[in-house]
Image (cartoon, rainbow, N blue to C red):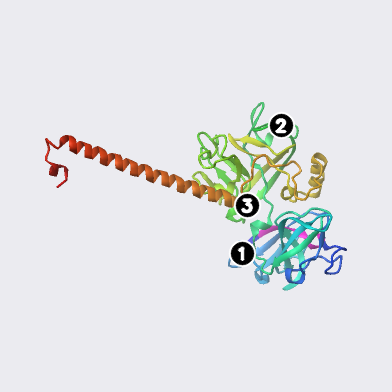
Amino acid sequence: MVARTIELYDDNLLNISTSSPLIAPGNSIINNSDTPNGAIPDFSEGSTVTVTIEDTSWDPNLFEDDDYANDRITDGSGLVANGTGVKADSLIFIRVLDEMGNPIGPTISVTVVTRDNVTQNIWGFRSDSPPVEGTQYVKTGGNSIGSASYTTLQSQPVCYSIGALADTPDGSRAVETLQAGDLVTTLHNGPQEILWIHRSDEPLGSAERDAKSVLNAAVFLGPGLPAKDLIVPPQHRILVGGCEQFYNRFEFDASAPAKSLTSLPGIRPMPGKRQITWLHFACRAHEIIVANGCLSESLLFGQMGIEGLTGTERRTVAKIFGSSSIPNEALNGPPAQRYLTAGTVRRQLKKSRNERTRRRSEAIKMWDADLSAERYAAILMCDDVIPRNALGFE
């Protein structure tokens, strides 16, 4: 029996539009099989709430598609009654509609969750790209199997643990001593003002391995990098390929999620960590800063970062950074460095390992060839003095 937390939107925030040719307007989306392709939902203003599920199934890391009996609500946060059996029912694929009614942008996957052993009883949803207030979408497809890893239904922050030392114009400072208005030193733009800073406590006892904080041990990035151990969330991005950080494994500067680097010595998840305090801070633009001597990112205020905030925090952020008129555009974007996916990073590291193995093998062959040549030269030099069979030749 394991307690799992997920973050969901109320299903009433994604309702069928009056312009939809399918399904009665005003109704919320249903499951995949009952929401036909071409249906047009609108997203209303709202944020996710945290829901706690008691998972007694054989795989407590997976929110199953058809297991009401083993997935029960212990804290429904007002969305659903405690004790209710729930499941990740199905996936609905949607795209943004432009002003002309044409689908644009990437496909967004929406997981809908049901209750009471009735597949039409949708009470919440979660999308892999946060929905934008006032935006119309169109359903383009779906999948009736909705099973999902719990980590995909959670927000993961970009932040630093208490005790991390950030470079500032006045020297290194513990992140917990920083305040809005303070300056931090950035890679590309010199000293920059912190406009927003936030502190949060995160329980990790029941988190999956992939959602655990990540330890970047001293000297794992390169000579003297980082200067001391650095703890960051799994999605926190580290500069690679530049400034001697993984310069021998990447051919260009980019940023990689910390969890994608765990195949390397010195960087690993922290499965024994039970709780951690994070400091999040954002500048006017997304920046690469120095923490414990390691180049990594400040907070990028994309939709995924915003949706984990309370209503009051969202209003504060909106006053500081304004709002974006473009769906899924970060308030302080674009990213300071090219973003690599975890899969891309892992493939590049594997390619780098294979190349290093190949070069090592070729070097060994060359050494063997040189040794044979030297041995043969010695034989020729000694041939008139030492019998050949004394050197092991017939």
Kind of residue at badge 1: Met
Q: Where is residue 340 in the image (x, y as percent from the top left)?
A: 61, 47
Residue position for label 2? 192
Q: In which quarter of the image is residue 372?
A: top left
Query: What kind of secondary structure does the magenta stretch mostly adopt?
Result: strand
Of residues 277 and 387, the one nearer the viewer is 387
Q: Residues within 10 Å of mark 2 (few under 14, many from 20)?
A: many
**Pointers 2 and 3 in contact (C-beta within 8 Å):** no
The mark nearer the N terminus, 2 or 3, is 2
Kind of residue at badge 2: Gln
Residue 333's label in the rendered image is none
Q: Where is residue 249 in the image (x, y as percent from the top left)?
A: 51, 42
Query: Residue at left 54%, top 51%?
Result: 347
How many badges with numbers are in the image? 3
Image: magenta residue range: 4-13
Residue 204's label in the rendered image is 3
Helix, strand or loop at label 2? It is strand
Q: Quadrant of the N terminus?
A: bottom right
**Vertical comparison of 341 with 87: above or below:** above
